Amino acid sequence: MSDPVTRHAPLAGRAASRRAEPVRCQICDSVTRPGLDLGHQPVGDLVLSEAQLGEPETRYPMQLFHCGDCGLCQLGYIVPPEVVYREFPFVSGTTQTATRHLQSLPARLAEQFGLGADDFAVDIGSNDGTLLAGWIPYGVAFLGVDPAGDPVRIANERGLRTWHAFFDDDIAAQIVERFGRARAITACGCFAHIAALDSLMRGIVHLLTPDGVFASDNQYWLDMVERVHYDNVFHQHLRNYSLRPIERLFERYGLEVFDVERSEVYGGSIRFYAGHRGAHPVHANVERLRDVEARARLYDPETHERWCAAVERRRDQLFGRVFDLKREQKKIIGIGAPAKASTVSNFCGLGRQWIDYITEVNPLRIGSYLPGVHVPIVDEQWLFEDPVAPDAGILFSWNYYSEIVPKLRQHGFHGEVIVP
Ligand SMILES: [Zn+2]
């Protein structure tokens, strides 16, 4: 059986035996300081089939490390990309909020930078092509690049041209040869996921026109800290970005961050715009956000220690609530099965004895099981048809609260909604 989880089991063992070696910063190579440790966990996005429940399952270290130099907060252990992306059951366009947000980026870029029919844009980690479709009204030619087979097939079937590949300097050179350079390059929710950072950056530098713009949405480390969003830690998410390390990274490649925005997507995110150094005027937003990070003491070890304590309190509260409900014979389910559901369930020990099932709308996940804890993932519709209506639902997809909760209420779910 070519299951990626078991196929790569020896890698985890090798890494564990090298544990004494210091973890170096993925951006500046400095030795890092250990931070929040969520234990060993399976890869959260790799949901299991029923047959796989009877097989061995690999868990990988899930601990954060902090760079005292550039300020990056990163995972200490990188799961081999071929394990993570071989069968990647995630599609971008499953909620209207995500679709709107992704498609707002081409609109913004086209309007602000005057992109039109003569221009070419590339989306890195384009998934099912949700963002690419946002270029259509502006007549901009586009290409997506993504390593996950199923979403790429969906995109190409929808006529959204997408290459099935990991984006790197080699792919960038092939794109330039075939289509020319891009005036816009986007990378949303994936820029933190690419392990070969140097090759990625060299690819961007090569692909971007001299006046081009690179724009990227990422979970914002400051929001994760202030809101105690530890469930945004998962194995694909190698780097938790904030402005200081991003600026340091781009400087190294002759690029410059010239504007930055915050938004609520992903539960708090940072969108930054970069170009070749000097190509665009630097907006006051950049200096403003540097000040915000300094005032929040985002790079202080004491801040990270306080955060670890807050995460542990959050875990105890969630488990305490679940324990109380179960003692009263209540039925608890989960709502939404993104990777963060795996992080929370595995960290808090919430298996099938606590959660009956998790509802989901993504057809690539329905019928599978959450890794590690093996809670079944069912079609959301079951929540409304279940003869024994659940008393409470843990909303793992809390970042879509305002879209999901009214919908559940409207369809007849009246149980308690617990935000983990
Ligand atoms: Zn660093």
Image (cartoon, rainbow, N blue to C red):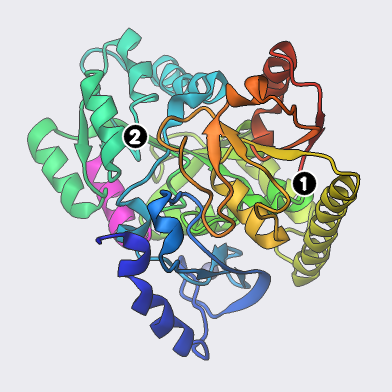
Q: Nearer the viewer, residue 214 or 417?
A: 417
Residue 199 is one of the magenta-drawn residues: yes
> Residue, x 34% and y 8% (percent of image)?
137
Taking the view exactly as shown, the residue that stands out farthest to the top is: 137
Q: Nearer the viewer, residue 130 or 372?
A: 372
Relative to 106, residue 275 above or below: below
Instruction: Tell whether circle 2 marks a residue whose Cβ is less than 8 angstroms from ligand 1.
Output: no
**Dividing the picture into quarters, in which one does residue 288 lie?**
top right
- Where residue 105 sits in the image (x, y, percent)? 46, 24
**Looking at the picture, does residue 238 appear above or below residue 387?**
below
Q: Is residue 230 above or below residue 72?
A: above
Q: Which residue is mark 2?
A: 126
* Quarter that holds the N terminus: bottom left
Q: Kindly identify the amino acid type of the residue bearing the numbered disc 2.
A: Ser
Q: How many marks?
A: 2
Q: Where does the image place residue 173, in percent across and percent down from the top left?
A: 14, 47
Spot the residue most to the front. Answer: 387
Crowd band around label 1 with a 10 angstrom C-alpha radius: few (<14), some (14–19), many (20+) = some
Q: Which mark is residue 282?
A: none
Residue at the spot of label 1 = 227
Question: Is residue 311 shown left or right of residue 215?
Answer: right
Residue ID at (23%, 12%):
117
Provide the residue span drawn in magenta: 195-212
Crowd around label 2: few <14 · some 14–19 · many ≥20 (10 Å): many
* Dominant secondary structure (helix, strand or loop) of the stretch shown in magenta: helix
SS of the residue at dot 1? loop
Position in image of residue 390 (x %, y %) = 75, 31
Looking at the picture, does residue 231 appear above or below residue 411?
below
SS at circle 2: loop
Amino acid at dot 1: Arg
